[in-house]
Amino acid sequence: MNSIRTRLILTLLLCMGTTFAPLLAVEPISFKGGYTRAVMREGRETIMLTQGAVVETGSIRFEAQSIELVGPNSRYLVGTGSVRLTDSSNRITITCNSISYDRETELLLVDGWVEIQDLEHEVIATGAYLSYSRPDGIMKLQIAAKLLRHTDSGPMVCRADSIEYDRTSMRLSLVGNSSIQWKGDTYQASATTVDLETDEIVMEGSIKGVVHG
């Protein structure tokens, strides 16, 4: 478990580009747990919550078997074991076994199997790795990535090695063994883009499919 927390924190730092960037203002934070251990050493502040850990910051609510608050102002949140994150402002729920969140950059990482429910856009997505930048509204899923969206013509099921889901522009980018099943038809290509507002599908590279006209 310690190795999982360490790997997630290191990945966050690498994605930030610099470890010692000046701290920006972040949302207030509240937390509770059946057992709590706090180490308030300057520069290495850590609070460990277990036995029904819950953390709330802004519109985000963390629930997990254990949650670690790391750094000045509890900048990093690392949850392990039956993790459930609810982002009420974006109507998103994320479930996984381990997760990390940088409260300054609002970058969220999951290294392991993850399921996302985006109720605002009627999307369900799964994969074995997730990077989610809340300010940009961009989710990147990798390894057996799958995204299902409800449409007026029935469910659209998208699969690829890697899927980028832009919630702001409502566009999908599928790279590597991409396939789409929709309205009884199947489309396969090296790379595919989907406009989720117009349901336009653009395929590139080696293309094949089965269309029931």
Image: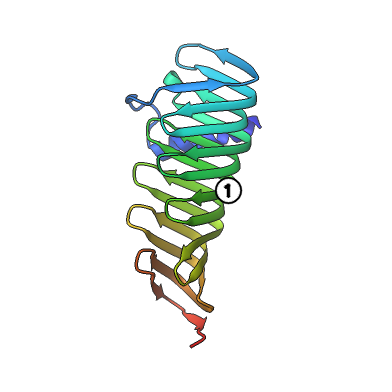
Dot 1 crowding, Cα within 10 Å, few <14, some 14–19, many 20+: many
Who's the residue at 40% across and 67% down the image?
194
Quarter of the figure with residue 52? top right
Who's the residue at 56% across and 54% down the image?
126
Q: Three-letter amino acid code at disc 1?
A: Val
Who's the residue at 45% across and 64% down the image?
174
Please tell me whether residue 31 is drawn above or below residue 123 in the rendered image: above
Query: How is colour applied across the structure in the image?
Result: rainbow
Label tally: 1
Q: Position of residue 75 (x, y in %)?
A: 44, 25
Q: Position of residue 186 (x, y in %)?
A: 52, 77
Left or right of 44? Residue 24 is left
Q: Secondary structure at mark 1?
A: strand
Who's the residue at 53% across and 32% down the image?
62
Please tell me whether residue 150 is drawn above or below residue 76 in the rendered image: below
Please tell me whether residue 181 is drawn above or below residue 59 in the rendered image: below
**Split into 4 quadrants, where in the image is the N terminus?**
top right
Of all residues shown, which one is farthest toward the top? Answer: 41
Of all residues shown, which one is farthest toward the front? Answer: 152
Foreground pick, 155 / 4: 155
Q: Which residue is label 1 attached to? A: 114
Please tell me whether residue 192 is drawn above or below residue 76 in the rendered image: below
Q: Position of residue 15 (x, y in %)?
A: 42, 40
Foreground pick, 182 / 99: 182
Left or right of 198? Residue 10 is right
Q: Position of residue 152 (x, y in %)?
A: 44, 69
